[in-house]
Amino acid sequence: MEKKIILSGIQPSGVPTLGNYIGALRNWKLLQSDDKFCYYCVANMHALTVRQDAQELRSRSMGMAALLIACGIDPKVSPLFIQSDVVQHAQLNWVLACNTYMGELNRMTQFKDKSAKHADNINAGLFTYPVLMAGDILLYQADLVPVGHDQKQHVELARNIAIRFNNAYGEIFKVPEPYIPKLGGRVMSLTDPEKKMSKSDANPNSYISILDDPAVITKKFKRAVTDSEGRIAYEEGRHGVNNLLSIYCAVTGMTMEDAVASFPEGSGYGLLKKTVADAVIAEIEPVQNEYKRILADRGELEAIVKRGAEQASEVAEKTIDLVYKKVGLR
């Protein structure tokens, strides 16, 4: 049976949150299976849409690679690489940009969101980075792209570009499909549980970083917004309590019914917050320990991403060679 090809990437724009971990990262290791072949990319070129300190970007890129391994990615099974180490990403970007319409990019909602956050640096890359993302996907002839609901628009653009290019030049690219894993859910802010947890939130108490110290995690959950009812139950409109219970279910594997029943009748929110904090710490502390171990052997980490880039480049060059021949560049 031919394996489905999967491409997943993450920007080195800061330490991922608990929401990133539950919604995406811990699922990536589960994608490594007999019927799938995965490429994992630290998307450092995408990070340039925001001004970066060069040394910090290099350090964060390697740190993100270490964190992905700590979350369960096996680089012996799936190539793990830094995006800029595979030059074909930049090479494909220009060809695809010439096959993408301005109207398509104008409709990308994330451009509007990011422009509002970085009003002093609304650059062309911020507008066209979805084309680079499409290239990331099409370069490896990916069948599936794991995304959250807010990223489906980018996969749709990649599909449109692939279909348009194929119609003009022949069947070159596979047309990818978005893949939304069943495991994991939407984790909301601890201080404003009606909006998604985000590491860019100005209030650090609103999110749990994967690398937060256990004492910090406990303190943040203690401050989490609940309500005045004082009952532990999952009910419509009770966003704060619902978020805590959802996180508890996500890290323990319990059903919502069993999670609620595990708290004795009359239990207060103090017990709920402590129990959730303890469960989160139990889940991510092994990840933190493995992350520290990997970072301590810098030579091995560099060898891993170098080997991953070589594996990825071998496949990417086949695509570039075909594309460049079709458009007349070779």
Image: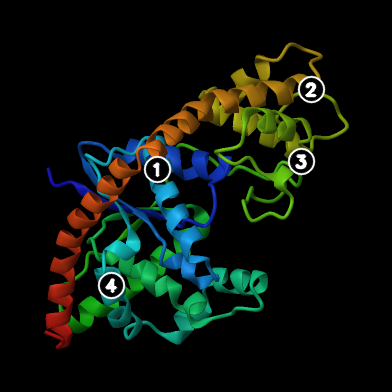
Residue type highlighted by circle 3: Gly
Q: Is residue 20 left or right of residue 233?
A: left
Q: Is residue 182 visible?
A: no
User: 19 and 11: which one is in front?
Assistant: 11
Up/down of 58 relative to 103, above or below: above
Name the quadrant of the N terminus: top left
Q: Write down the residue under mark 2.
A: 270
- Residue 237's disc number: 3
In primary-sequence order, the first of circles 4 and 2 is 4
Q: Which residue is mark 1?
A: 66
Mark 4 or mark 3, which is nearer to you? 4
The amino acid sitting under disc 4 is Ala
Q: Residue at coordinates 17% horizontally, 86% vertically from top-left?
A: 327
- Crowd class of label 4 (few under 14; some 14 to 19; many from 20; radius 10 Å): many
Give the Cα distance between marks 4 and 2.
Answer: 52 Å
Whether pointer 4 and pointer 3 mark residues with C-beta atoms closer than 8 Å, the reply is: no
